Image: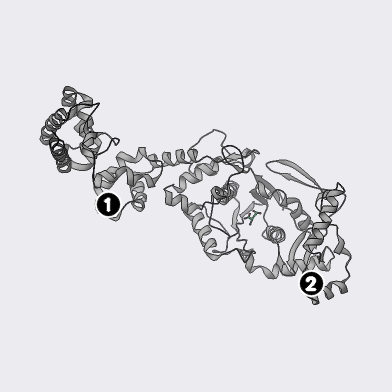
Amino acid sequence: MTENTAPRVRIAPSPTGYLHLGTIRTALFNYLFAKKEKGIFILRIEDTDTERSLPIYEKDIIEGLKTLGISWDEGPDIGGPYGPYRQSERKEIYREYIKKLLDEKKAYWCFCSPQELEEERKAMLAAGIAPKYSGKCRHLTQKEVEEKIKSGQKGVIRIIAPTSTTIEFNDLIRGKITVSSEIIGDFVIAKDEETPLFLLANAIDDSLMKITHVIRGEDHISNTPRQIIIQKALNFEIPKYAHLPLILAPDRSKLSKRKMETSFVEYLKEGYLPEAILNFLVLLGWHPENDQEILSLEEMIKLFNLKRIQKSGAVFSVEKLDWFNAQYIKNLPLETLVERIKNFVPAAWLEKEEILKKAVVVERDRMKKLSEFKELAEFFFEIGEWEVETLRWQGMSLNKVVLNLKNLYDAINKIDEKDFEISKLEKEIMPLAETLGRGESLWPLRVALSGRKSSPGPFEIMWVLGKKETLSRIEAAIKKASELL
Ligand code: GLU
């Protein structure tokens, strides 16, 4: 790897669950880095855990990333020069390297039972030494190993870790990291000759896929020295490493597993926009030099710089996510917003496209999530039951309510249908409303039209409903109130 080669980075999710925000953030940072540096972004599926990996999770991860606009240059779905890109299809490769390590005596079979290991660990702790594997099985002869395997003894394969030295790497975010080899010990790299563990498969693939920069979560930082040991043992190039800050809860504690693993699809179902989620995530640990907050994917690419990623944990706040979502809802082109909202409303509303569109116009600033639209806009389609009492503004009499509504009815009736626009309606009706008393007229009018204590203003509602429905609702309210006089 020379300094001049175009970077090659990857996201390497394990398909053991649905796509979640942690993976999206890592994918996004890798994607932005690749785009910014004119490099290659790779998707590799790490499905060596055959019990927990499922094809539906892989599908969900791939579709979710695509929905977000994150695309890759090489991956299991599109192939590429260093494939296959699914670890379950790379068994032959792992077998070859495990064999190489065993043949070169850089790794060995270990048959210590969990109990033996536990006893060893306790003894070391009691002696005040940092516990690590003693290396007991390192000295087994080939013959002894073969016999144990033949007799059905369960074993694992360990790599010989260096001793009396330090493993160093220069983390691009955290700076120089030095770990004493004394605390590592010979660690397990494979269950058998064809079943590598994560540490090994991941390190082999990074090298064979010519990954230049491993950008991943800080939870992997303790794996890196071990992976460097593996890469050195195999004479592989060692990639550069960058560990992204942890995502923390608002009280800076570890984010709950439940929150961390809520799937992206759940967020979509709640009415979060993919654009807002990306924007929220990119600022979890990074911000541009100009402190711009609202960033499109193109702007992120333009402004992204690995050097500006922070070391300290990034706080995940749902309020902040809601704020971003509200901003995107406010600013999305109307047609796009209407199309997306269609997934959140009853089928019957789709037949009233004009009302739906107008309702979106008047309600969009009141929404944090698309799922809130249904509740906010229900009354435009069906006013439903409501309390006559709601019509009173600050204890005014129902007599006055009826009188004012009648006056308003007459005035509205005179307005031409084509003048049913918010500003025109306001201009026509406000003088009368001032005479009748603002609160005493506009409040009952708004309630007559919406049946609610809170809603957009009466002129906005009238614009959405149109003349006929407006008059019919006022009439119904007059009737309802008159019955109690
Ligand atoms: N499969 C690992 C994970 O999902 C990948 C870690 C890495 O990026 O190296 O956490």
Q: Is residue 120 visible?
A: yes
Mark 2 Cβ and ligand 1 under 8 Å apart:
no
Residue on which the image places disc 1: 349
> Image quadrant of residue 158?
bottom right
Pointer 2 local density, CA inside 10 Å: few below 14, some 14–19, many at least 20: few
Q: Relative to the observer, which residue lies in front, 450 or 64? A: 450
x and y, in percent, of residue 348 in the image: 26, 54
- Way the structure is coloured: one colour
In terms of secondary structure, where does tag 1 sit?
A: helix
Q: Is residue 425 above or below residue 185?
A: above
- In the image, taking residue 139 as reference, residue 444 lies left or right, namely left
Spatial separation of the CA atoms under disc 1 and disc 2: 67 Å
Which image quarter has ligand 1? Answer: bottom right
| Residue 248 coordinates in the image, percent (x, y) | 59, 41
Closer-to-camera residue (173/2): 173
For badge 1, the amino acid type reads Trp
Badge 2 is on which residue? 153
Q: Is residue 140 left or right of residue 198?
A: right
Q: Amino acid at mark 2?
A: Gln
Q: Position of residue 446 (x, y in %)?
A: 23, 34
Where residue 413 sits, quadrant-wise, is: top left
Task: Tell me the SS state at disc 2.
Answer: loop
Picture residue at 46% right of the left edge, 40% below the top: 324
The yes-or-no answer for disc 1 within 8 Å of ligand 1 is no
| Residue 148 figure quarter | bottom right
Point 82% across, 61% down: residue: 116
